[in-house]
Each structure stands twice: as structure tokens, then as C-alpha cells.
Image: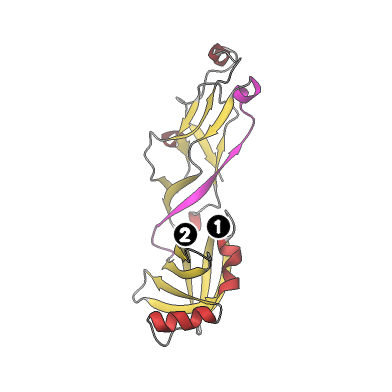
Amino acid sequence: MKALTISGSLRENVGKKDAKMHRKEAKVPCVLYGGKDQVHFVATEKDFKKLIFTPEIFIVNLKISGKEYNAILQDIQYHPVTDSILHIDFMEIFDDKPVIISVPVNFTGVAPGVLKGGKLIRKIRKLKIKALPQYLPDDIQVDISELNIAGTIKVGDLVRENIQFLDPLSSVVVTIVSTRGVDDDAAADGKPAAGGAKAKAKK
């Protein structure tokens, strides 16, 4: 998984008045939890752009007043009118402790069902996984090269070493539905519809 460094400084006071003062200075109040103690700090708002305005997932190296922590983004609060960042929560991660995180799903290959006129329906755009930090992927790539009309790939069909999928195994990740003028019997041509066989999830 990609890494990103953000520098910040400890908050001397924790409260609404202090938080408001920092926001006027274009800084974001943050909290890091998951370790021995919670760490309250602030960082410049513009430094979060690469972390927030992207579909990519990052491990964040937080440099706070001379100390370093590895963390993942846990929650963001936005202003309801201006959409400016009000507060960010981070969770500290450790090499020997599994992390639960949602990662984007990307598809590889060309589905035969699409070539026959079917429509690809993406049911899940992010999958919740559990893994040690060193095994966290940037995304989950799902091969659809054998997916025919009426075929589906479910969470339970995905296979990947060192990763546990936490979504219900029966949840459909992707399917192909017939469209007007396309006979569902087209799925019988060539390879059978995917869904019963295991689908390999690649990095």
C-alpha cells in the first residue's frame, strides 16, 4: 500500500475554542487513537488534499512534534455548508496487529457477456478486508474475463493470500445483465456464466 507523510504539532489545549482558532489558521484538529494514549494534534489543511481527494488508500506516516506514527484515515468531519474539513480521526497501526480497512475494487479483463451485448453492473465498489499492514493492498483486482450474461462474482468467490474478506460471502461484487435485444440464452454460448467457480483476486 502507498505511503504518505503528514507533519503536525501537538495541541496545547483541547476544546471547541482552541479548535476554532486553529481552523481560522487553516489548520485541522486531529486525533490519533489505537495506541497507548490518544494524541491530539493539528496539521495544515492543504496537506490533506492528496489523502482525501483520491480513491487511493494510504498508510499515513504522521510526524508529530518529533515523534512518528503509522496510521490509517478513520473518519473525516466536514462543515455542512462550506465542505471545509472540521476534524480528522486517525487509527494507529502496528506491524503485528491486523488492520480492518475498506479498499477499492477494480476489474481486469474483458467480459464475454459484455461483448454479447450485456451490461456490466458493479455492485460493490469497496471491499472491507482484514490483514496485517504489510499485506494491505492498494486495491482488489477482480478478473471478469470469464463472466457471461447472468453471471456473477460474489465475495465468497474471491481468493487472496493473507487477506480476510469481511463482507458477507454471498454479496455480489459484479454481475452482467441482459439488455434489450439480447437473449439470455447467449450465456450458453462459449463458456458458462461465472459465479460458481472461484475468481482470483489479484493485487
Q: Amino acid at mark 1?
A: Met
Q: Is residue 170 left or right of residue 63?
A: left
Residue extending farthest to the front is 81
Quadrant location, the N terminus: bottom right
Q: Position of residue 41 (x, y in %)?
A: 45, 79
Q: Quadrant of residue 167?
A: top left
Vertically, is 115 above or below 10? above
For mark 1, what is the residue? 1
Q: Nearer the viewer, residue 24 or 168?
A: 24
Mark 1 vs 2, N-terminal side: 1
Please give the name of the residue rendered at 46% of the width and 68% of the height, measured from the top-left corner. Answer: 88
Magenta-colored stretch includes residue 102: yes
Please give the name of the residue rendered at 53% of the width and 48% of the height, measured from the top-left corner. Answer: 104
Q: CA distance from mark 1 to mark 2?
A: 8 Å
Per the image, label 2 sits on a secondary structure element best described as helix
Q: What are the residue bounds of the magenta stretch?
A: 95-116
Mark number displayed over residue 133: 2
Q: Position of residue 179 (x, y in %)?
A: 57, 21
